[in-house]
Image (cartoon, grey):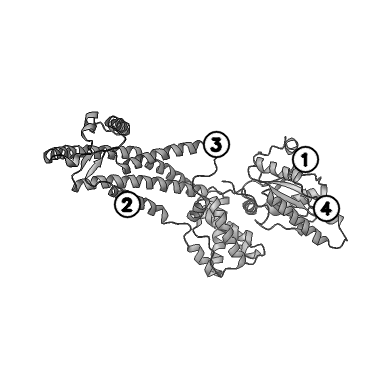
């Protein structure tokens, strides 16, 4: 699935998830979209003589739903046509850098090539420093973010996070959720594009400086010289020898220099008071040397700045292109698995359940399978692990659980709603699961036991709601999402498509 297709699919998921009351999209709308998408996907697959894929079905379904929403809501149609992010940024930054580099030599003497030119030395030195920083950053273990901040990445991914006016509340909530989700999902792609643009801009800045240096030489007679309060000729010769070694090695036709040449080009403090004849002689010698130093600086910047930056930009561009063509959208998400189940695509989803201080009887075990079918599709299977005893160390209790086992769609911690959440027990259990489960963990809170014990008592609903609020606050503190279920009567707590068992996306 490419970037455009993934963006539409994520947008539809966000809208359907937010529209739990079916105010924007009725059940008939959703079923019609699924049915039409299934037929269109089958037709396209038959043309290409291939099987119907989940990617193709999801893209066709998203197009059907977005088309219907655009027909009903003009403000949403305008949002769809709006270009996300800052599309002009990617071309504008390198162009601005090129012009800035061309203007850089304005701060130096326009009639002299300074052997210790601060602007040119800055270009080379800064880029060499950046190469070291990039190398160190690449070696940082388990790094998850780059140098760009989240605010910049959000602007580059979705632009201004503002939804159009006059939208139904569920649709506005869906668009807001989409912009947040898309910022996270597209982060690898945005970082690759930003890296490409930054490297191109650095190369353009250096290229602008070199072009300006040569262009000015066409209309101006360059002299050459240097002056320093703290450096003598020997030190300057050593510095320039190191600096220009790559250029002299790669381009042997370039004219080198000796210590005597450096001595001859030093501008003495009293040069302005010298005789006119001596000054004229010095000027002629400096002019003859000017071309040599222009070529040396130009070749050095080409080798140390422009070419390396272009190579880095090429690698970043290839990565960005690969991500744009094959966008890394995790289709194991419960929302996608349930839709895939409707067309029989893919393998059945697996809900792995780890009960904590909670033993399931046969009726609740059947209810757990019903919950899995509601959340992940009719083909979903349940993998029920042994109950973790209360107070036992999670690491010891889950030693044989294989939390990194492949093929698990969702890992859920199951608690009895009647229990009081405790940081040192329930919290430690959740924290251990979150750290050791790649896709994160969700929480299932079974209310059936609490309702059984409180049957016939006054104020049952209020006590249940208070306990739900307590558990959700507790789970939020531990970075998980809680879903209330009733394992004896699953229909009491239906799980809408995409609204339950929320998991962080894989990136």
Q: Earlier in the sequence, mark 4 or mark 2?
A: 2
Q: Secondary structure at mark 2?
A: helix
First in sequence: mark 4 or mark 1? 1
Of badges 2 and 1, the one in the foreground is 2
Could you tell me residue 7's position as x and y percent?
Answer: 53, 55
Residue 141, numbered circle: 3
Residue 212 is at least partly visible in this image: yes
Find the distance from the CA under tag 1 to the CA under tag 3: 35 Å
Looking at the rendered structure, the number of numbered marks drawn on it comes to: 4
Residue shown at 66% from the left, 57% from the top: 499
Which residue is the site of mark 2? 99
Q: How far apart are labels 4 and 1 at the CA level?
A: 19 Å
Q: CA distance from mark 4 to mark 2?
A: 72 Å
- CA separation, marks 3 and 4? 46 Å
Residue where numbered disc 1 is placed: 386
Q: CA distance from mark 2 to mark 3?
A: 38 Å
Give the mark, 1 or 3, whose residue is nearer the N terminus.
Answer: 3
> Which residue position is annotated with label 4?
449
Tell whether label 1 touches label 2 (CB within 8 Å). no
Viewed as shown, does residue 447 lie left or right of 28?
right
């Amino acid at each position: 699935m490419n970037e455009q297709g993934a963006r539409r699919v994520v947008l539809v998921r966000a809208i359907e998830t937010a529209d739990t009351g079916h105010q924007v999209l009725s059940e008939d709308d959703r079923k019609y979209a699924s049915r039409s998408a299934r037929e269109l996907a089958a037709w396209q697959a038959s043309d290409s003589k291939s099987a119907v894929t989940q990617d193709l079905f999801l893209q066709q379904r998203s197009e059907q739903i977005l088309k219907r929403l655009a027909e009903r809501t003009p403000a949403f149609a305008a949002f769809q046509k709006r270009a996300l992010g800052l599309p002009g940024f990617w071309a504008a930054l390198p162009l601005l850098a090129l012009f800035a580099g061309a203007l850089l030599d304005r701060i130096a003497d326009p009639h002299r090539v300074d052997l210790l030119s601060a602007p040119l030395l800055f270009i080379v030195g800064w880029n060499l420093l950046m190469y070291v920083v990039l190398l160190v950053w690449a070696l940082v273990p388990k790094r998850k973010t780059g140098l760009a901040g989240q605010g910049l990445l959000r602007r580059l991914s979705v632009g201004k996070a503002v939804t159009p006016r006059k939208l139904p509340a569920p649709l506005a909530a869906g668009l807001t959720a989409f912009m947040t989700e898309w910022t996270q999902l597209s982060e690898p792609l945005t970082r690759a594009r930003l890296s490409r643009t930054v490297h191109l801009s650095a190369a353009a800045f250096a290229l602008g400086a070199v072009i300006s240096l040569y262009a000015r030489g066409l209309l101006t007679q360059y002299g050459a010289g240097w002056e320093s309060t703290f450096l003598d000729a020997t030190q300057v010769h050593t510095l320039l020898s190191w600096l220009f070694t790559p250029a002299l090695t790669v381009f042997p036709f370039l004219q080198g220099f000796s210590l005597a040449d450096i001595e001859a080009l030093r501008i003495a403090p009293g040069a302005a008071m010298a005789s006119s004849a001596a000054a004229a002689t010095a000027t002629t010698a400096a002019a003859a040397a000017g071309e040599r130093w222009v070529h040396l600086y130009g070749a050095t910047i080409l080798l140390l700045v422009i070419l390396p930056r272009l190579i880095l930009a090429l690698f970043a561009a290839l990565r960005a292109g690969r991500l744009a063509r094959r966008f890394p959208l995790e289709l194991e998400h419960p929302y996608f698995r349930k839709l895939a189940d409707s067309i029989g695509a893919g393998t059945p989803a697996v809900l792995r359940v780890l009960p904590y201080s909670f033993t399931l009887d046969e009726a609740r075990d059947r209810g757990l399978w019903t919950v899995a079918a509601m959340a992940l599709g009719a083909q979903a299977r349940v993998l029920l692990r042994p109950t973790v005893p209360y107070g036992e160390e999670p690491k010891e209790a889950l030693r044989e659980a294989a939390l990194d086992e492949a093929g698990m769609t969702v890992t859920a911690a199951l608690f009895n709603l009647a229990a009081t959440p405790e940081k040192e027990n329930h919290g430690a259990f959740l924290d251990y699961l979150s750290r050791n489960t790649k896709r994160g963990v969700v929480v299932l809170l079974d209310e059936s036991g609490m309702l059984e014990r409180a049957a016939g008592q006054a104020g049952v609903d209020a006590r249940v709601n208070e306990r739900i609020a307590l558990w959700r606050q507790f789970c939020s503190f531990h970075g998980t999402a809680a879903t209330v279920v009733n394992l004896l009567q699953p229909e009491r707590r239906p799980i809408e498509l995409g609204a339950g068992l929320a998991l962080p996306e894989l990136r």
